[in-house]
Image: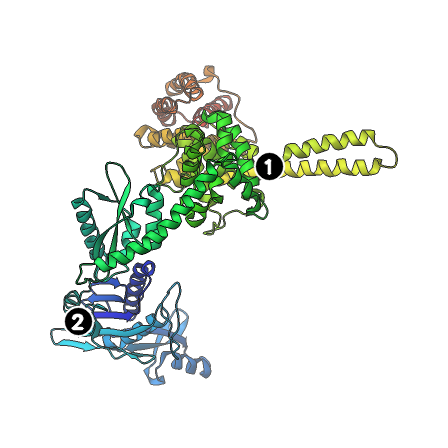
Amino acid sequence: MPDLLIELFSEEIPARMQARAAEDLKKRITDGLVEAGLTYAGAAALSTPRRLTLTLEGLLAESPTVREERKGPKVGAPEKAIEGFLRGAGVSRDQLEERETPKGAVYFASIEKAGRPAQVIIAEVLEATIRNFPWPKSMRWGAGSLRWVRPLHSILCILSDEEGARVVDLDIDGIKAGNVTQGHRFMAPGEITVSSFEDYSTKLKRAYVVLDPAERADAIWQDATNQAFASGLEVVEDKGLLTEVAGLVEWPVVLLGSIDDEFLDLPAEVLQTSMKEHQKFFSVKNPKTGRIEKFITVANRETRDTGATILAGNQKVLSARLADAKFFWENDLRIAKSESGMTAWTEKLSNVTFHNKLGTQAARIDRIAALAREIAPVVGADADLAEQAAKVAKADLSSEMVYEFPELQGLMGRYYAEAAGLSQDVANACEAHYSPLGPSDDVPSEAVSVAVALADKLDTLTGFWAIDEKPTGSKDPYALRRAALGVIRLVLNNNLRMTLKDSFEASLKVLLKLAEWQGAVLEAKTAEAAAGEDTLEAAKKRVHDMAHQVEAARAVINTSGEDLLSFFHDRLKVFLRDQGIRHDVIDACIAMDGNDDLTLLVKRARALEDFMKTEDGENLVQGFKRANNILSQAEENDGVEYSYGADRKYAEEAAEIALFDALEAGEGAISSAIEAEDFAAAMGGLAALRQPVDAFFEGVQVNSDNQVVRRNRLNVLSDIRKLCGQVADLSRLEG
């Protein structure tokens, strides 16, 4: 079986596109070959800045012969129908076979498709792949019609086996496939002829090209950490930057450079961000002080002066970049320490639109501040501090540093709040209120930070719900799912007891200015009472208009609140499923009262999940469902509701009496546990019912001929349903 080697050699491919492109090449080629009947033993895709490479082992030399039987029209069918079938099947009349079927005699055609050589199939699949490659962005060059991410220079495509290597015959817009590749652009320019993947990778390594991006990344990290360690320093880990830099070089050469002393007092995050974003440098810190003192850059070639010239050039460019950062930092500090402080920045936000239907950033800050003040007592924060923190939390959006480096928003807010002399709680809230940004992000725990973070996210969610800009399908342009998950994690991680409906209502009241409209109604009514005959109609109309605004606001509050709570429940299901809690268990708990108290809801769900993992839990749920089904059917047939309580004096069987005892004992224990929110104890109370319920169904006939006894037993089933229903809606559990 031959092996296949493909290389698409071009100008530099953007680093961010290389990994995806290599996987796309692998998928499209392998899918196309398999669809055409060519299977293989293994495949691997690799990439460098100038090439995409695919190697397949154990490929079939040709596709297998395929035999297909096709059913045609009935014998005696119109001639045109038969001729159409013959054309479609590619057979002649004498090749048809008549067979008897339950519907009469029918023509059948046996079609044999001969296998095709691998070279022919590969050429077709590779051309289709190249012409339809899914680059995020592509270009045309010269006079041809071919599109590629950068100009495509050559195609290497060979099949190799024991007899040698054969070039696949392929020509795309004048680019003819061959067995030739190129080495390093500067260190080993020139053509390299290859005969197999092993030969290809070995010769490229000699020509200063490391084919595997993972190998390049490992080499960069190893050399970088060794050089930093030799200087008593540490490289700041950044996996994303490491992957990107590995995609910028074919022969990585690690160089350690110095930062001018005048920039060492800049915040470490500013240095790190500036070097990463502008220069793709790794930061090197002093482990004792945490200060960034040097940098790592990765060159794409070895030089006679061991990189001295490259380092000098990089340090010169870096100094210019850091001079800008220092200028921004000093200007921002001057404003933060001025008499007006951070207020100067927040005032500028009145000219920045947050959303055309939700007003400016300044208006949003006012809403967040009002909501943070209301949330503060719930999270144990000082209301004045929470309001103050909310008012300055987004001030750094107007700073020069954040304008240059938006990813530093929040962090710079903390630095500037500290410089302005604000309390540490307020400064920390400036940085932490954006968190958590994702499922693995740290969750704020300081009370003021939690209050502002919740207010920020709740304002975002209620605002977009009020203007009907909700996530649809996979589209979520305003990251509302992330905001909801952030609220969920803030509440659960800090064990907060807050009702979401009240929080939604408070946020929507601020957004819709309900208090102002209500005040306007009172003013309008006062004006109406004092109006003369000539102005009375206008005064009445104003009262009507103001009252209509209040009613409209209340309608939005009611509908948005319910819909938003349902959205939160969906997000909570995803969050808890990732923690191993079954979706039906979550549904059973959401169906209970108090489902807008997330801490209570999750506490109940976890207890029920643990209970369902026990034998008692599974069996009791089956008993509950049996009781519920019998009771529901009887209520439907009889047209009455059996909910008036059973009477012990009508109990006839020992198992029946034992169940009465168990229900009486369980009701007190379970009710007390539910009231104390001790759901584990409540589940323990349910577990005690398992044996009496099982014995009841085994030894007692519910539908007795004695109607008094039957009604009493149905009321016993109703008691079981009520008691179990205090814990969760067990009817929603599967199984």
- Tell me: residue 234, above or below residue 723: below
Residue that appears at 39% across and 70% down: 139
**In this image, 727 relative to 539: left or right?**
left
Could you tell me if residue 390 is visible in this image? yes
User: Mark 2: which amino acid?
Assistant: Pro
Which quadrant does the N terminus fall into? Answer: bottom left
Q: Which residue is mark 2?
A: 2
User: Mark 1: which amino acid?
Assistant: Ile
- Tell me: residue 443, above or below residue 275: above
Q: Which mark is residue 557?
A: 1
Which quadrant does the C terminus fall into? Answer: top left
- Tell me: residue 367, above or below residue 53: above
Instruction: Name the image quarter holding residue 88.
Output: bottom left
Of marks 1 and 2, which one's residue comes earlier in the chain? 2
Residue closer to the observer: 612 or 467: 467
Secondary structure type for disc 2? loop
Answer few, some or many: residues within 10 Å of disc 2's Cα (few below 14, many 20 plus, some between 14 and 19).
many
**In this image, 363 relative to 488: left or right?**
right
Nearer to us of marks 1 and 2 is: 1
Could you tell me if residue 733 is visible in this image? no
Answer few, some or many: residues within 10 Å of disc 1's Cα (few below 14, many 20 plus, some between 14 and 19).
many
Q: Which mark is residue 659?
A: none
Looking at the image, the residue that sits furthest to the front is 262
Residue 235 placed where, x, y %? 24, 45
Residue that appears at 45% across and 48% down: 403
Residue 369 placed where, x, y %? 53, 33
